[in-house]
Image (spheres, rainbow, N blue to C red):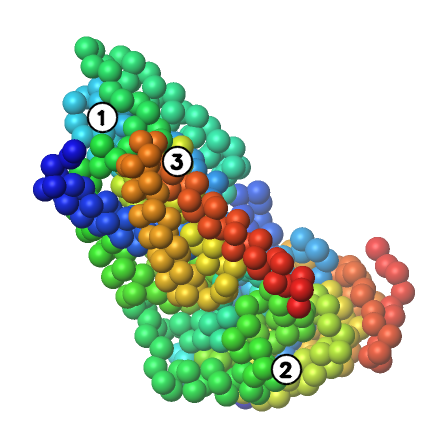
Amino acid sequence: MEQLFEISQLAAGYDSGVVLEDVNLKVRENDFIGVIGPNGGGKTTLLRVILGLLKPLKGTIIFNESLPGRNRIGYLPQMAAGDKTFPVTVTDVVLSGLMIGKGAVARMSTADRQRVREVINELGLEKIRNSPLDVLSGGQLQRVFLGRAVIGSPRLLLLDEPDNFVDSSFESDFYEKLHDLNKRMAILMVSHDIGTISSHVKSFACVNRKLHYHPSPEITNEQLSAYDCPIQLVTHGRIPHTVLEKHD
Amino acid sequence: MPDTILQYDFIIRGLLGAVFASITAGIAGTYIVSRRMVFLTGGITHASFGGIGIGYFAGINPIIGAAVFGILSALGIEYLSVRQKIREDSAIGILWALGMAIGIIFIYLTPGYSPNLMSYLFGSILTVTKADIIALGILSAVLIIYFSVFYRTVLYISFDEAYARTYSSYVDIFKYVTTSLMAITIVLNIRMAGVVLVISLLTIPPNIALIFTKRYTKIIWLSVLTGFAGTAAGYFISYFAGIPVGATIIFTLVIIWMILKGGMFVLKRNK
């Protein structure tokens, strides 16, 4: 399995202060990493640095030169992002995932539109392809934004708290879909909910100012304490999970 | 009885003015309404009044002064909101009042000349010159070309700026250019509707369109059509009734909006 990119000695932050420091992480082609940690611990900041939205204060992110399309990244932002009443259709939103590498004078070809149709059908959105976003359910919205994230066949998929989309009927489908996608791309998923994600991810990264990598999907309370990674647990009844005891 | 040639000239000017005002206001208005920038647009409009005052005082074309003020304030607000150093709505409120204050002071200070303030505040047929129509025509062409060539880019930056930044390094450039075009659109339409009312010329047609469609390009088309109906009707009604053109246009547009919105409401309830 080839390495996709490597973060070394990374520090990042804002005017208000340093949020991440001394972060090291290697991500391989088919990794599925659950990124957990307390609120304000730097999870979203890490995603922003990987996406190139935030310049690191120190350190580097180096993508493997030998992989084609190595820096092509799909991104599923938090639920709150974007204006749901904005006049765009489902097709428009999925189509925007093909803007990568297109330049400002972006023309959509017949092949592009064909590809959008395929992705829309694959995600079960064909009945609402021309609907505006404000009539969609939470689960449908999530699928639309997932479609936008993966249509460009990215090497890496970044998901920022996808479990915040309130639509439990789609949740298991969603993780199954991620399992499929993981055969083609590495996935980094930020989550509050280790109960749910531990049955899907292959490894964990605890982010609380520093990053601790945990190479297996099983993680215990003691390990979390050792990593200085107090996290908020959100649990659902339908999915097998372990409730860990309270810790500081 | 007015001279027939003059009357012919007046009708042509009125029709062309209505066409270009509705094209520019329809395109710019769709952008402004969908990006929820209506208050920002109000701020830019009133800030540009400062340029009108300075233009009078310095003896240059007030519309050029207004354009400079409009673009600078628009860029200033965009820049500050990108940096997130200030609260955007407060900045707009301050700029809004500052522009009006500067305008009034300089018009008052202009020696031996008392310009017709009302025509800039509320619009007037008499101040719409051939040069204004030509300027609006050129702006129409620029906006049509800009929005056709960069349609996807502009649409997706408006919809989800953060996501656009993940694939594009020219998000800020496009925001600045588009906002400048909005400012120019506002300033050139001040001749038609006046500082106080021009905001409605941009916001009412897209809101009429939104009653029927949620598709961006269709909103533009419908805005231009309804804008033309309202502007042309308002222009000619104002001439024959001898009332201010801006107020007549806006009144006509609001009546259209109310009838359609009310009709839609009744239709939906009876379904």
Helix, strand or loop at disc 2?
helix
Q: Does the rendering let one see residue A84?
A: yes
Q: Does the rendering let one see residue A11?
A: no
- The x and y percentages for residue A79 are 63, 63
Q: CA distance from mark 3 to mark 1?
A: 25 Å
- The x and y percentages for residue A45 are 57, 58
Task: Please name the residue that numbered disc 3 is placed on.
Answer: B247
Tell me the residue at 22%/32% (across/down): B126
Q: Quadrant of the N terminus of chain A?
A: bottom right
Q: Nearer the viewer, residue A40 or A56?
A: A40
On screen, B185 above or below B219? Answer: above
User: Would residue A24 be found to the left or right of residue B156 on screen?
Assistant: right
For label 3, the crowd category at 10 Å Cα-Cα, with few meaning under 14, some 14 to 19 and many 20 or more, is many
On screen, B243 above or below A153? Answer: above
On screen, B54 above or below B69? Answer: above
Q: CA distance from mark 1 to mark 2?
A: 61 Å
- The x and y percentages for residue A71 are 44, 74
Q: Chain of mark 1?
A: B
Pointers 3 and 1 within a single chain: yes
User: Would residue B231 be found to the left or right of residue A188 on screen?
Assistant: left
For label 1, the crowd category at 10 Å Cα-Cα, with few meaning under 14, some 14 to 19 and many 20 or more, is many
Q: CA distance from mark 2 to mark 3?
A: 57 Å
Task: Please name the residue that numbered disc 2 is placed on.
Answer: A178
Q: Chain of mark 2?
A: A
Residue type of the residue flagged with mark 3: Ala
Q: Chain of mark 3?
A: B
Q: Nearer the viewer, residue A235 or A228?
A: A235
